[in-house]
Amino acid sequence: MLWGSRFTEKFDDKALEFSSSLSYDINLLEWDIKVSKAHSKMLNKIGILTDEENKNIQQTLDIILFKYNDGTWKPSITEFEDIHSAVEAELTKIIGVVGKKLHTARSRNDQVITDVRLWIKNSINEISNSIINLQKSFVEIASQNVNTLMPGYTHLQRAQPISFAFHLLAYVEMLERDKERFNFTFEQADENILGSGALAGSTIELDRNLTASELGFSKVSENALDSVSNRDFILDFLHSCNLAMMHLSRLSEEIILWTSFEWHFIKLGDKFTTGSSLMPQKQNPDLAELIRGKNGRTFGNYFALLSTIKSLPLSYNRDLQEDKEGMFDSYFTLFDSLNLMFEMIKSMKVNKKRFSEEIDGSFMLATDLADYLVLKGIPFREAHNILGEIVKFATDENKKLNQITFEEYKEFSPLFEKDVFNYLSSETCLQNKKTYGSPNPKLVEESIKKWNNLLN
Ligand code: ARG
C-alpha cells in the first residue's frame, strides 16, 4: 500500500474507484516519467542514489513508458489511486528495492503539479501552432477577398460596407490576443516547484536548480506552501482556452449565418457539413454549431475549478485533484475545434459578388455622404439631419441613394456637387476610407503583408 504500514485495513474498493484519478491523469504519464527521471538524476548527484541505481531507474522508467505505449502495461483504476502511484508500483515491481528509493524527499503533492506544469507548457505550444495555422488560412483567404464587399453590421443591422478580408482580419487579431494570453499562461506555468515536498521542503539538500534545468523550467519557486497549493496557472490556462473558444464560437455563429439561404454568402465543403435524415435538400453547418456549443463546457470547466479552490486552506487538499479533468477537457475541446475550424475554412467557397449590387447606392453609404457635407463645412449634427431626410425621402420614393437625381440632392443642400455620386458606388466606397484601421483595400493589403511576415 502506497501510504505504508500505519494502516491495518486495505482501502475500500468503492472508495478507491471513487477517488482514483488514473482514468484521466494517465494523460500525464509521459511527463510523470520525465519528472521522475530528473528527480532520480538529481538524487544521484547529491549522493542518495548510486550511479548504478540511477541508471537502473532511468532505463526502467523508459521501459514503463514504452510498455504503456505498446499496450503491454495498462494500470487499472481498481488498483491505483493515480498515475504517480501506478508508475512507482510498476518500477518497484520490475527493479525491486531500488525503485523504493525514487520517492525520497518527494511528495505526490509536488510531483503532480510539476507534471501538470510540463503538460500545460507542451499543450500551449501545440495550441499556439494550431492558432497560427488558422491565422494563416484567414490571411490567405483575406488576400483573395480584399475587394469582396459585404455589409458590416452593428446590432445585426446593416451599417457600413466592409470587405470580407477586413472581417477575417478581425479574427486574426482576436487569435493573436489568444496567443498572447497563452504566452502569459506559459510563463506562469514555467516554474520548477519540484523539491517543495508535501508542503515544507525537505531536510535533504535537494538541488532544485538541477531539476529545473533538466525539465526546462526557467525559474525555481520560492515558497513550498504556495507551490503545492497554487493552481492559478491552471485557471489562467482554462481562461485562455475560454476566450479562444469564445472567439471560435463567435466565428461559428457568423459562419452559420453566412451559409444560410438568407445570407447565401459562403458555402462549406460537403466533407464538413451534414444532411437531414428527413429533408433531402438540407445542408447543415453542424461542425460550426458544435464548436459554438462546446464553448459551454470550457466556461464550465473554468468556473468549476474556481469554485473548487475558493475556500481551500493552504496547502494541498485532495479537492485539488479536481483540477485535471476540466483542464484536459478544455484543452482537447479547444485543440480539436481549432483544427476542425482550419479544415472547414479551407473547404469554404465565397460568393464574392453576393453583396456588391446591394451595397451600390445603399443606405449603408449615408454616413459617407454626411462626411462629404462635413468636408464642405456643415457641422456634423446638421449633416446627419440632412442625410436623415434624404434617407426618408429615398425610402418614400423607393429609391436607392444613387437613384436620387443631382437636382434632388441640391434641394437638400446646395453644397452637393456632381462628385457626390463618387461616394455612392460599391466600386469606390472602400477606397474612399481614409483612416488607418479602416477597410481601405490599400490598408488591408498592408495588413495582409504584415501578417504574412509575422506568421511565417
Ligand atoms: N492524484 C492526486 C492529485 O491529482 C495526487 C496527489 C495526491 N496527494 C495526496 N496527498 N493524496 O491531486
Image (cartoon, rainbow, N blue to C red):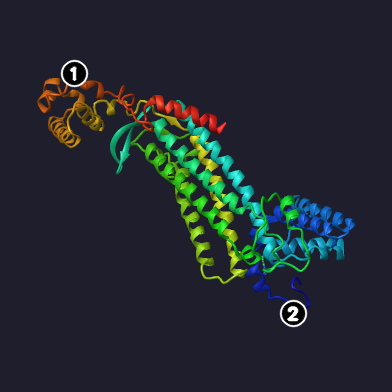
Residue at the disc numbered 1 = 418
Amino acid type, callout 2: Phe
Tell me, for residue 7, which label it has, or none: 2
**Left or right placement of residue 34 versus residue 360 in this view:** right
Which is in the foreground here, disc 2 or disc 1?
Answer: 1
- Judging depth in this view, the residue of 236 and 363 nearest the camera is 236
The local crowd at label 2, few if under 14, some if 14 to 19, many if 20 or more residues have their Cα within 10 Å, is: few
Q: Give the SS element for disc 2.
A: loop
Q: Quadrant of the C terminus?
A: top right
Q: Position of residue 197 (x, y in %)?
A: 71, 66
| Residue 416: quarter of image | top left
| Residue 389: quarter of image | top left
Q: Where is 202 relative to 446, above or below?
A: below
Residue drawn at the location 70% of the way across and 75% of the way down: 11
Tell me, for residue 6, which label it has, or none: none
Residue drawn at the location 74% of the way across and 80% of the way down: 9
